[in-house]
Image (spheres, grey):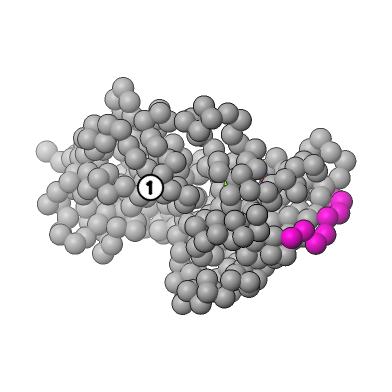
Amino acid sequence: EALANQIAAGEVVERPASVVKELVENAIDAGSHKIVVRIVDSGLSLIEVTDDGSGIEKEDVTVALRRHATSKIKSSEDLFRIRTLGFRGEALPSIASVSELTIETSVAKEESGTKLIAKGGKITSLEPLAKRLGTKISVANLFYNTPARLKYIKSLQAELSHITDIINRLSLAHPEISFTLINEGRTFLQTAGNGDLRQVIAAIYGISSAKKMREIKAFDLDFEVSGYVSLPELTRANRNYITLLINGRFIKNFALNRAILEAYGNRIMVGRFPLAVISIKIDPHLADVNVHPTKQEVRLSKEAELMALIRKAVNSTLSEGVL
Ligand code: ADP
Ligand code: MG
C-alpha cells in the first residue's frame, strides 16, 4: 500500500500547487468560511492550510490517510452526482507518502481534538489536542523521499505562480469564503468572504481592472451562466485570465474558451484575450468530472448548446449601451 500511495502521488501530487489545491479543496468541502494558506519555499519546505470547517472525528483521522477512504461517497450512485470537490480519497494518502504531514483537527461534538504526525506515510505520533474548531494540515519537506520528483521542480518562481493561480481560481469560485495566501510571511492575497465576486476580482486583478468588468447572465433549460467579463479595452496577452467554473469547480475547456472569444469577435485584436470569470450551473448528470485524477478536464454533454448560451450572454453584455 505504501508503494501504491507513492504511485498515486505521482498522479495526484505532481507539484506543490497540486498539494495546495487538494488541501484547500478539502477545506472547502468541510464547509469552511475562512481558509488561510501559508507557503515557504514555494511549498517545498512548507504548505500549511488552516480552516474553520467541520473538522475530522477522532476515529476518522487515521482512516483519512488510507487510500480510497473518502467520506464523501456513500454509494456508486453518488459517483454520478458529485457535488463535493474531492471524491476519490486519494489526496491525503498520496501527499502523506511523499512528505512529513501533520494534521491538527477538532470537531464540535468531541471534547478534545487530535494531532497526527506522519512521515513518508507512516504515522509517527497520534495524540489529543486542545480543542480548536476546524483543521490545520501542514505538509513539510514535500518530495523529500522522491528525489526524481524534486528534480523535476525546476524554478521556485514558477511553482509559486502555480500556487497563486490555484488560490486565485478557488477564490473566484468561492466569493463566500475568505481566502488568505501568505508567502514567506507576506500576505499575497486576501479576500473578504462576503460573497461579492467583483470584490474578489478586485483583490486578484486590481481595482481598476475590476471596474472594467461587466456582469453577464443567461440561462436556458439546461444551463445557468453568470459572472463577469472585461470590456474590450481590457485585454491580456494570454488566456490565463479566463476562469471557467462548472458547479463551483474550476475547469479547462477549449470549446467554451472559444465561445467567449467568438463573442468578442473583432472587438479585440487577434492574440489578445479578455478577463472573464464565468460560472456555469448545470445538472451534474450533464458533466463528467471523473475523467482524470486532477479533475480539471470536464466532458460536457450539450457542449454546443452551452457555447451558444455563453456567446449570447457575453455578446449581449458587450453590446449594451451601444446603438
Ligand atoms: P477526498 O477529498 O477525495 O474524500 P482526501 O484524501 O482528500 O479524499 O481526504 C480524505 C478524507 O479526509 C476526506 O474524505 C475527509 O473526510 C477528511 N478531510 C481531509 N481534509 C479535511 C479538512 N480540511 N476538514 C475536514 N475533513 C477533512
Ligand atoms: Mg480531497
Can the viewer see residue 236?
Answer: yes
Q: Amino acid at mark 1?
A: Glu
Residue 29 in magenta stretch: no
Could you say which is closer to the camera, residue 53 or residue 296?
A: 296
Q: Residue 133 appears at what percent x and percent y? A: 76, 45
Describe the element under mark 1 as helix, strand or loop: loop
Disc 1: which residue: 297
| Residue at position x 21%, y 60% in the image | 272
Residue 308 location, quadrant:
top left
Q: Residue 86 appears at what percent x and percent y? A: 55, 43
Could you say which is closer to the camera, residue 50 or residue 59?
A: 59
| Residue at position x 52%, y 27% in the image | 77
Chief secondary structure of the magenta span? strand
Could you say which is closer to the camera, residue 252 or residue 90?
A: 90
Residue 303 location, quadrant:
top left
State left or right for residue 155 relative to residue 132.
left
State left or right for residue 154 relative to residue 224.
right
Which quarter holds ligand 1?
top right
Q: Residue 280 appears at what percent x and percent y? A: 37, 36
Judge whether 50 appears above or below 226 on screen: below
Q: Residue furthest top?
A: 221
Ligand 1 closer than 8 Å to the CB at disc 1? no
Judge whether 35 appears above or below 315 on screen: below
| Residue at position x 78%, y 55% in the image | 116
Judge whether 92 appears above or below 144 on screen: above
Quadrant holding the N terminus: bottom right
Q: Which residues are magenta?
A: 122-130
